[in-house]
Amino acid sequence: MAIFALGINHKTAPVALREKLAFAPEQVPEALQQLAAKLQLVDAVILSTCNRTELYFSGGAEQAEQVVQWLAQFHQLSLPDLQPHLYLFQDQQAVQHLMRVAAGLDSLVLGEPQIFGQVKQSYNQSRQAGTIQPLFERLFQKTFAVAKDVRTETEIGANAVSVAFAAVTLAKQIFGKLDNVRVLLIGAGETIELVARHLSEQGATKLSVANRTYERAENLAKQFNAQVLTLAQVPSRLAEADIVISSTASTLPIVGKGMVEQALRQRKHKPMFLVDLAVPRDIEQQVSELEDAYLYTVDDLQSIVAQNLNHRQHAAAQAGVMIETGANEFQQWLLLQDKADWLRDYRQRCEQVKQELLVRAQNQLAAGQDPEKVLQEMANKLSNRLMHSPTQAIRQLLQSEQPDASELVKVLVDL
């Protein structure tokens, strides 16, 4: 049976199609049951994130075609509309693709760590559904081992490659631990939500969210147990913030030099770290002139991101070599499994011959025949039966004039 990886991702399909093809968490058990029952797949894993939907399974070429049709039917999509966006990898390519995904090399943000946990969660769901058999157990355990080695032995995740993460990384470098640092987030869009998530992951707990629309700020604040402010409250509450990160769609600055100057006086000139991720700017450029205010703009962070992306791309090249090695090791294991099957079958045939001749000899002895003749006959028949096929194979090998055939035969017959 072959190993397949089928799916779409951010490189092959627009978000509108990815949304339609995504599996909600509650849909996965039913989908796995259908793959097992309708298509007789013994190994099947479904990975569904915002940037990809992928199915990993083992089977034949006909089953692969059936899975493509099933995927379209399950999501009520037209196969002709879906097919141009699909990719289908087999065997070595499928194994390498899975390892690249788990290591973050195929992600929208190169080296992002969340995908490793998502792959592991998908694997656990499949185990619970009974669609992980020994082949995929070995495949996924090898994948997890390779992905961990990539994380620990390369710098694939060491540098920030999004402005949101770069902002939080800078904040952590300045303040060290963030658990007692007070953070004011201005805005409630996607960028600020991402900043809040990174802050929370780094231990920040004292968050406030200010937004023009109070309801949106409230919805974001609930996710991170943050306080909610209106934009009108920002001037009076600014002095409380050690860190200010802003990203709104405002056409005019929200935080001016005078506002920050007053806040610094109230703070007795305790330093304030400000990050402006908005275009146009939310924080007046003149704020950088203040002695105790440290202002970074999106341009400052973009240069950091560009440098870090170069570091990650170098690490990705190292990781690619590690993944190729891991995939080759898995393929070698597969080959050994095939050989082990051959050896097991050969030993079973030898055992059958032995039992057959043993029963015959026992019957002859019970009939009163000469024991010495019975044993001699049994020994001759046993050696002839066991040597017949290997002898023919050895003769053919020697006649083939293959390089090292003689040496191979010597090893096989222990000469």
Image (cartoon, grey):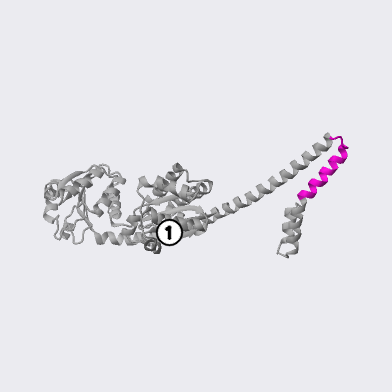
Taking the magenta stretch, the answer to whether it contains residue 368 is yes
Residue 386 is situated, as x and y percent measured from the top left of the image, at 76, 49
Q: Residue at image x 42%, y 47%?
A: 120
Instruction: Tell me the chief SS of the magenta region.
Output: helix
Residue 155 shows in the view: no
Q: How many marks?
A: 1
Residue 159 is situated, as x and y percent measured from the top left of the image, at 35, 55
Q: Amino acid at mark 1?
A: Ala
Q: Quadrant of residue 317?
A: bottom left
Taking the magenta stretch, the answer to whether it contains residue 338 is no
Residue 65 shows in the view: yes
- The magenta stretch is 367-386
Residue 69 is situated, as x and y percent measured from the top left of the image, at 43, 57
Taking the image as shown, residue 380 lies to the left or right of residue 106, namely: right
Q: Residue at image x 37%, y 55%?
A: 52
Residue 375 is situated, as x and y percent measured from the top left of the image, at 84, 40
Which residue is more in the foreground, 164 or 304? 164
**Pointer 1: what residue?**
316
Which residue is more in the foreground, 172 or 413? 413
Classify the position of the N terminus by image quarter. Answer: bottom right
Taking the image as shown, residue 398 lies to the left or right of residue 218, namely: right
Give the crowd class for mark 1: few <14, some 14-19, many >=20 residues within 10 Å. Answer: many
- SS label for mark 1: helix
